[in-house]
C-alpha cells in the first residue's frame, strides 16, 4: 500500500509546485494589493498567500477539474474579508502603506476593486463570493475606481502661513 502511495504523493507534490511556480507571484501581488502594503514589506499579504496555498494544497486531490487558481483566489479573498472583519471590525482599521494608491480605500473597496479589475472576476461572481448584492459590488467598484483615478488632494497652505518649528 505504501509503495503505491509514494509515487502518487510525489506526482501531487510536483503538480502543486508547478502550480505555485506559475501562480504564486500573481497571487502574492493580489494579496499585496488587498492589504495595501508596500511590495517589499508585505507580511500580511505573505500570510494570506501562505494560508491560501495551504488550503489549495489540502484540496488538491479533490479539485477534480476545478481551476486551482480560482480555488486559491477565492480562499485568499474570503480569508482577507473575514480576517479584516474579525480583526478590525466591519472592514475598518487595517494599516495600509501610506504611499500605496489603494491606501485611501476601505478594505471592502480594495477587495472588490482587486477582484473586478485586477483579477477580472465578473460582478455576479464577486457578489456571490462576498454575499452582497451585485448592485452593491457595482457601486463600490465605481466609487473605488473614482477614488484611485481622481484622488482627493489636500489643499495647499495659504501663502504667508507658517508652521511651528520642530
Image (cartoon, helix red, strand yellow):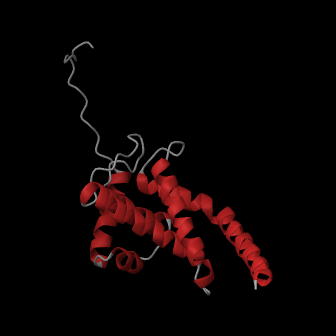
Q: Nearer the viewer, residue 55 or 116?
A: 55
Give above or below for 7 relative to 88.
below
At a point 49% along the width and 47% down the height, the residue shown is: 42
At a point 53% along the width and 60% down the height, the residue shown is: 49
144 left or right, relative to 68: left
Q: How many marks?
A: 0
Q: Which residue is outermost to the front?
A: 1
115 left or right, relative to 132: right
90 left or right, relative to 20: left
x then y, percent, for residue 119: 50, 67
Q: Which residue is outermost to the top?
A: 165
x then y, percent, for residue 152: 28, 45
Q: Nearer the viewer, residue 38 or 164?
A: 38
Is residue 120 in view from this perspective?
A: no
Q: Quarter of the image holding residue 10? A: bottom right
Give above or below for 114 relative to 101.
below
x then y, percent, for residue 139: 28, 68
Q: Quarter of the image holding residue 124? A: bottom left
At a point 54% along the width and 60% down the height, the residue shown is: 50
88 left or right, relative to 4: left
Q: Nearer the viewer, residue 159 or 9?
A: 9
The quadrant the N terminus occupies is bottom right
Is residue 141 in view from this perspective?
A: yes
The quadrant the C terminus occupies is top left
At a point 67% along the width and 65% down the height, the residue shown is: 22
Give above or below for 166 relative to 5.
above
Amino acid at each position: 500500500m505504501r509503495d503505491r502511495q509514494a509515487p502518487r504523493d510525489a506526482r501531487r507534490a510536483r503538480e502543486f509546485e508547478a502550480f505555485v511556480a506559475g501562480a504564486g507571484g500573481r497571487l502574492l501581488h493580489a494579496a499585496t494589493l488587498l492589504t495595501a502594503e508596500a511590495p517589499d514589506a508585505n507580511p500580511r499579504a505573505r500570510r494570506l498567500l501562505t494560508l491560501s496555498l495551504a488550503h489549495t494544497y489540502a484540496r488538491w486531490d479533490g479539485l477534480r477539474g476545478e481551476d486551482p487558481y480560482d480555488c486559491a483566489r477565492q480562499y485568499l479573498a474570503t480569508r482577507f474579508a473575514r480576517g479584516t472583519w474579525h480583526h478590525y471590525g466591519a472592514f475598518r482599521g487595517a494599516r495600509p502603506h501610506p504611499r500605496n494608491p489603494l491606501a485611501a480605500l476601505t478594505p471592502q473597496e480594495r477587495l472588490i476593486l482587486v477582484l473586478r479589475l485586477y483579477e477580472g472576476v465578473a460582478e455576479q461572481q464577486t457578489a456571490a463570493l462576498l454575499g452582497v448584492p451585485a448592485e452593491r459590488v457595482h457601486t463600490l467598484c465605481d466609487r473605488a475606481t473614482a477614488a484611485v483615478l481622481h484622488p482627493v488632494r489636500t489643499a495647499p497652505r495659504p501663502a504667508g502661513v507658517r508652521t511651528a518649528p520642530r
